[in-house]
Image (cartoon, coloured by chain):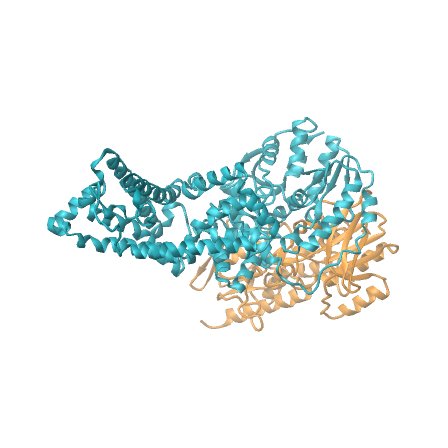
Chain colours: A orange, B cyan
Amino acid sequence: MKESVVIIGGGIAGMETAASLLELGYSPILVEQSDHLGGHVASWYRLFPDMTPASEVVASLKSRLDGVTVFLETGIQFINRLRDGYNVMLSNGVSIVAKAVVMATGFKLFEAAKKEEYGYGIYDRVITNRDLEKWFSGIPDERIPSAPWNIGFVHCVGSRDVKAGNTQCSKVCCMTAIKQAIEMKEKFPDAEVYCFYMDLRLFGKKYEDFYISAQKDYGIHFLRGRVSEVSETIDGRLLVKAEDTLSGRPVKINMDLLVLMSGMLCNPAAASIASMVKAGADDSGFLRSRDNVTGVVESERKGLFFAGACTGAKTVPETIAEARSAALSVHNYLRRPR
Amino acid sequence: MRERIASGFDPFVLPFLVGMAFVLLYCFFGALRVLWQLPREDRRRFLLSLFIPATAWKNVKDIFLNCLLHVKLWKRNPVLGYMHSSIAFGWFMLIVLGHLEVYLFVPSRLHLFYYPIFFNYFVAGADMSLQGAFLFFLMDLFLLVVLSGITLAIIKRIRSDIFGMRRTTRASLVDTVGMYALWSIFPLRLLAEGFTAGISGGSFLIKPLNWLLEVVFGTEFLQNGANMLPTWWAYSIALFVFMVVLPFSRYMHIPAEMMLIPMRNAGLRIRHPRRGFALMEVYSCPGCGVCIDACPMSVKKGNLKDCTVYLNRQIRRGNEKRIEEISDKCLLCGKCTEVCQVGVEGPALRIAQRSRKEYGLSPDYAAVDVGRLSAAVADSPEVLYFAGCMTQLTPSISRSVCSVLDKAGVKYRWMDRTEGLCCGRPMLQAGRFAQAKEMVRRNTAIIKSSGAKVLLLSCPICYKMFKEHYKLEGIEVVHHSVYFDRLRTTGKITLTKGDLCYAYHDPCELGRGCKVYDEPRNLVGTAAYIVEAGVSREASICCGGSLGSISLSFEAREAMTRNALDNLCKGHPDAIATACPLCLSTFSRYSEIPVRDIAEVVDASCQG
């Protein structure tokens, strides 16, 4: 009989882990809390750097799941550590005994309303990166005006911000902001687009090209400095106050739309599941790997593995690569004679 | 009644006399020094105030009620109140009655300092008259009172929690010596008088003790005058030790407070952290340590040595490094002053200390265009609304304030809607008075040019500043909680009672700072249900977000915020209401239940 492996979380990390384990000859059981697979990526529009449609990525992952047991709308009731493996009790009453469990619980988007000075949830013209992706994929959003003059992107909302309770860099938002800024400029060629950044972290392949193109080909303005506050003008527009630290001057710009680049936090469900099997979390809230250099996908507990953003912010390709790595680690672990 | 010692002297009184002379001289020169350090106008004011009958009477009354009877402490903690007043008032009465005895029975000895203190040693058969018996009865009674206080003090040292104090000060060496000396004075007096009671006479306390001693030592032993001397020596030496360490120990508060009270009644304020009036406050600190429990920073045993009692101690020791550290760290919430029996102004001491700092760079406000800012508020209607920096960062508050004003039909102008100048309080709290003054000057010009009659504020930090440091004749400075309550009582707005149950948090600057406690509660009570927090009003716990601290890290404040939240949630409210934008954003960060400003609460349940 094929060995069962429980994978918690049906986002791209969970799907790729399940598909890879299936190909390695195991019987993966994929548990997802929501009613669909694909996680955050399923609600996105296009992915940098090649503007790949997110739906294609999710669809191709889904196509490889034939033979995987998938439980949708199912949570984890509890997990017990056994002498050699785990007993996982699902909310639908199913109990699974497996030698290996992979946590692919992903991230949670920082609640932008917590940075009240930016006015999310208070002013009509303030949205987040997620809202914008949804709108790109065709879901109407009345906060987005039909002909905006000025559009602003605020980087690092709830990332690298001790007051917001998250000192970590969320890694992908710099690039996402540039991608979305370009997409907005394509939709509204007459609008001026501004990015307010602390510093730009464009570490990946082609990212720098994107940034240069955004300035040269699209005329997007990059202002180095944090936004201090946002207020609403009498005509319903936004007045954004920031500091341009390169010229050393305070700036005030009227905006018709402000997009907040909300950062990544660890999914709070992950910590509670991990604590049931006494796996730890870092100060940042993300789950603690056995080793941050050689053992990122392994936990400190035997038979418990991690894949994707549950151990820290990651891009889509990194997540997929890590999911494959997790599958291979599970395979090696199960093959090892005990 | 007769005198037993013809010379009226015995060498054992010498330790007492030396100690007494020392402490009197020390206090005399100390008082002169403080007077010398006062700025000239303060000194004049103080000395003149002593001759104003009303102030003089108030001085006497305050000294009697606070230094002797400890009335404030009684109200706060009756057991501690009894303990302190029994020692202070009991001892005072022993001295007064001692003098009365000398005056009545041996007036020729009245000029001898020590006679009233050691009266029993020098006389025989003093209880033979009705007068004498009555006085001896009173003496025994007050000695018993003092002894009961000492007993409580000893119990308190061992188990302070019985007295409702979780933490007390760690006594320094001098304090410990002083404390043991003080504890031993009265039992030794009892013993000494017990030995002598067979000759001098006595009442219900020392007479039976004398009989007891007779049983133990035998009648012959007791009748030999030389045998009672060691106890009188011990009593005198205990007094000597106490008086010699007094100026260097916390017991200095006994004489210092007697001078602090008249100075405060004269209206003196702290101008320098180590001189004059400040020094008086520092020396008046009894080191009791109630400020340790009160300090919001002391949560989870953190920052225990940074509360006011230790600031006072370090100032007395001249430990510059620690003084600066303690002064910078404080949140300036004012709770230590609120609980302090002597009223030592911890925050004012710290601000004065901060003002001594030297900065390489000072901001320049010359570029602020008062003319343009004034033009923006010209011809303003009756109400001028100043949201302040903190409210700009919490737009839900300003939005609700404007909404309520609109519903009430109040005409207003928003002074700092697009730009404005800081009220100056953060600079003032940092001790940078010149910079604060600059802002006050400019804001005053802008506000006066507007023609408004009411300056409405949303932030208690600004509110306190405008109320205390601006001269805006003819313009009423009011916080929105008070203004909205007025709109409610005058029928301009009507509030419908909702289902939610709120706990109201008193912001430091609005509550302890400006004594606004009832108006916000009236509003919440009308718009919703209200449940009091564990401690509230004057005892309210700082949210931890205060601008007052210039060195506390963000992480270090988390425990304080969580502690304040725990206190607010004691009555299991559905939500928290407060009236300060800074408290709001600080609490929102960690609260599990919603946090709302009073303006939001009012707006949600208000019809125009």
Residue B115 placement, left or right of B490: left
Q: Which residue occupies the extreme right position in the image?
A: A190
Dividing the picture into quadrants, the one containing residue B480 is top right
| Residue A204 placement (x, y as % from top left) | 72, 69
Image position of B257 (left or right of B576) = left
Residue appearing at x 43%, y 50% in the figure: B288
Looking at this view, is B386 or B534 the one in front? B386
Q: Residue B376: image x %, image y %?
A: 82, 44
B258 with respect to B431 (left or right): left
Number of marks: 0
Residue B203 placed where, x, y %? 22, 39
In-front residue for pair B375/A204: B375
Looking at this view, is A209 or A236 the one in front?
Answer: A236
In the rendered image, the quadrant that contains the N terminus of chain B is: top left
Say left or right for B179 vs A203.
Answer: left
User: Nearest the camera: A47 or B135?
Assistant: B135
Q: In which quarter of the image is the C terminus of chain B?
A: top right
Which x, y percent locates residue B393? 69, 49
> Can residue B180 be spotted in the picture?
no
**Is residue B41 shown above or below A62?**
above
